[in-house]
Image (cartoon, rainbow, N blue to C red):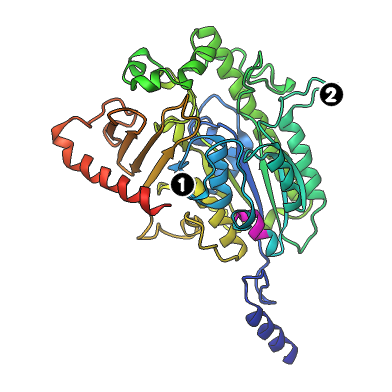
């Protein structure tokens, strides 16, 4: 009895901020964070696509919590990944290009650093995506196991590889190796960042799939999005029409034959990711980790597949900023869908709460854990601020506010500034801007005020 009291007293004095839990407390969960690159929000079976084959992800989603309204605060790789790591908007973490990295106090307040300090074995595999080659290489010292790669993480199939192992499968192999090095009783956090389904820019076949998937979807005609029309393109601001998005549309979607080739390869890459997720789940089960491992799945940004005559991402339209997202917690395998607004800045706080680690005051996102365990809190966000300032020479700068019903889009690169306003309840495809409609002047003014306040408060 005395020994038990002393253990409890020691735990209370040390506190949970150092990762020390009471002797009788349940074990801290392992964490597997799966990030896909450029994955469109609805290009998965559990998000409504009836063509793509994603059985493993669909199974996890069916027994987890799916966030039907999950978004990024900036739709471009480096900025979004920095936001995921730090739980911060771009205007606070300051990553706006592909050269700068997270160092010093900025790194110490990321979820991997916080978890490692709290006793987690941390691993990173795949595309790191924040900073140049030197910045990426330096991160090897910040993880217990590092297999991170800089830039776009190389070709999908390396030219000098006689086995023709696809990069997606290689990352899956490395994930199994990481799990083989984990021990029962010591929690781990594995961050696996696929470079699929991002195009290999400039390659003859930008979305080259695993050779095992070449036959998939070959006899299927995949429909283009409803907004892949000339009319939708003509509604765009002139700066957007002349942007990098249009150049990439010309590379991929300017003929029906070319578009089908891109769409089929895109879906093949998604199915390749799904296969590796299945292997990881099987390995967790094999090693006895499955019952206490939380799996989080999302994308770093959305993706335009010809929508509005555009290719890639960047802009504040739904296809660019909306992403898939779910959390599978085997301790609560009930299966539910949540409509509350979830953001990429929320994943870091979520992982820290799962681990019992206090959130650094620098984090601006909110833990999603309450949404898994009960009704949406009364004070949960009903709007969020969006910003995109990267590669301004080719991508027009924009900011705005997205609420549960309205979207206010502000093209800050246009002179004078151009505004767009959409009632998403009546116009979910964002086809009729109401910014010039006198009947909507009050809501326009209100959202303009929200934009102004958020742009200051989030610094």
Query: What residue is drawn where x is 62% and y is 62%?
Result: 355
Horizontal and vertical percent position of residue 287: 79, 52
Disc 2 target residue: 163
- What is the chief secondary structure element of the magenta stretch? helix
Which disc number belongs to residue 3? none
Between residue 340 and residue 130, name the one nearer to us.
130
**Is 353 left or right of 393, judged from the image as shown?**
right
Say what secondary structure mark 1 lies in.
helix
Quadrant of residue 10 within the rendered picture: bottom right
Between residue 219 and residue 385, name the one nearer to us.
385
Binning the other alpha carbons within 10 Å of mark 1 as few (below 14), some (14 to 19) or many (20 upward) gives: some
Disc 1 target residue: 91
Q: Does the rendering let one see residue 62?
A: no
**Is 5 left or right of 42, judged from the image as shown?**
right
- Residue 111 lies in the magenta stretch: yes
Between residue 166 and residue 407, name the one nearer to us.
407
Q: Does the rendering let one see residue 82?
A: yes
**Which residues lie in the magenta part?**
110-115
């Amino acid at each position: 009895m005395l020994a038990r009291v002393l253990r409890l007293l020691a735990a209370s004095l040390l506190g949970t901020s150092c990762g020390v839990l009471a002797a009788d407390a349940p074990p801290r969960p392992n964490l597997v964070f799966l990030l896909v690159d450029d994955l469109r929000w609805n290009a998965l079976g559990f998000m409504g696509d009836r063509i793509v084959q994603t059985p493993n992800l669909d199974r996890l989603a069916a027994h987890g919590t799916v966030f039907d309204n999950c978004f990024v605060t900036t739709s471009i790789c480096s900025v979004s990944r920095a936001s995921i790591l730090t739980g911060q908007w771009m205007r606070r973490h300051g990553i706006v290009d592909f050269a700068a990295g997270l160092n010093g106090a900025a790194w110490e307040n990321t979820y991997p650093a916080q978890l490692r300090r709290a006793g987690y074995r941390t691993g990173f595999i795949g595309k790191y995506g924040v900073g140049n080659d030197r910045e990426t290489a330096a991160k090897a010292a910040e993880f217990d196991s590092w297999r991170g790669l800089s830039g776009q993480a190389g070709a999908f199939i390396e030219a000098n590889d006689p086995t023709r192992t696809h990069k997606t499968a290689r990352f899956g192999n490395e994930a199994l190796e990481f799990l083989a090095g984990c021990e029962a009783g010591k929690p781990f956090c594995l961050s696996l960042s696929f470079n699929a389904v991002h195009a290999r820019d400039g390659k003859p076949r930008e979305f080259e799939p695993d050779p095992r998937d070449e036959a998939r979807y070959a006899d299927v005609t995949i429909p283009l999005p409803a907004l892949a029309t000339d009319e939708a393109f003509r509604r765009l601001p002139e700066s957007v029409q002349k942007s990098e998005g249009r150049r990439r549309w010309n590379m991929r979607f300017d003929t029906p034959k070319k578009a089908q080739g891109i769409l089929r390869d895109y879906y093949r890459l998604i199915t390749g990711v799904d296969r590796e997720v299945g292997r990881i789940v099987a390995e967790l089960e094999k090693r006895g980790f499955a019952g206490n491992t939380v799996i989080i799945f999302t994308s770093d940004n959305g993706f335009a597949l010809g929508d509005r005559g555009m290719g890639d991402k960047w802009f504040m339209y739904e296809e660019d900023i909306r992403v898939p997202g779910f959390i599978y917690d085997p301790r609560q395998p009930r299966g539910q869908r949540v409509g509350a607004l979830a953001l990429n800045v929320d994943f870091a706080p979520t992982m820290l709460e799962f681990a019992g680690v206090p959130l650094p005051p620098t984090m601006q996102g909110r833990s999603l854990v309450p949404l898994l365990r009960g009704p949406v809190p009364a004070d949960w966000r009903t709007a969020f601020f969006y910003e995109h300032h990267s590669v301004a020479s080719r991508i027009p700068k924009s900011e705005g506010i997205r609420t549960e019903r309205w979207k206010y889009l502000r093209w800050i690169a246009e002179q004078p500034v151009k505004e767009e306003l959409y009632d998403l309840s009546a116009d979910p495809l964002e086809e009729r801007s109401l910014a010039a409609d006198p009947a909507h002047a009050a809501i326009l003014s209100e959202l303009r005020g929200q934009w102004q306040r958020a742009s200051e408060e989030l610094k």
